[in-house]
Amino acid sequence: MLKKIALISLIGGTSLNSLAATQEVEITGVGISNSTKTVYIGVSPNISDTSCSGSSQVRISLVDSTVAREVYSSALTAFASSKTVKVGYDDSSSAECLLNNPVVQSFYLIK
């Protein structure tokens, strides 16, 4: 329980004020890339209301992020146990995209 709360409040140093949307999704795949320096998480259904051109994945940068590995671990857990997660992201028209995908701002594993 404490890990869930910590993930929501600490992701990437992002202010919760910029968090505009959350969506419940199932994890369809999880990866980590040294070449792009990102954790990428496949989601279903696709992320709605995003200005990013990609919506079948969410990403978080490994650069300057102490939480990316925690998100990776939580995503693997959700994927392996077929659990639903709630992903937070910025759905504004000026939202930051990472390799054309929404950036994870919060990640909550649902029971």
Image (tube, rainbow, N blue to C red):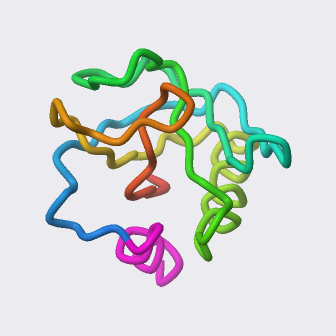
Identify which residue is drawn at 36% across, 36% down. Answer: 24
Q: Is residue 62 above or below residue 59?
A: below
Front-lying residue, 21 or 109: 21
Identify which residue is drawn at 14% across, 65% down. Answer: 17
Judged left or right of residue 35, residue 27 is: left
Q: Is residue 82 magenta?
A: no
Image: magenta residue range = 1-13
- In which quarter of the view is residue 5 placed? bottom left
Q: Is residue 32 above or below residue 56?
A: below
Identify which residue is drawn at 44% across, 52% down. Answer: 110
Q: Is residue 85 above or below residue 45?
A: below
Q: Position of residue 69 (x, y in %)?
A: 70, 65
Front-lying residue, 83 or 49: 49
Identify which residue is drawn at 22% across, 54% down. Answer: 19
Q: Residue furthest right?
A: 34
Q: Main secondary structure of the magenta part?
A: helix
Q: Is residue 9 magenta?
A: yes
Q: Position of residue 20 (x, y in %)?
A: 16, 47
- In which quarter of the view is residue 28 placed? top right
Q: Position of residue 47 (x, y in %)?
A: 37, 24
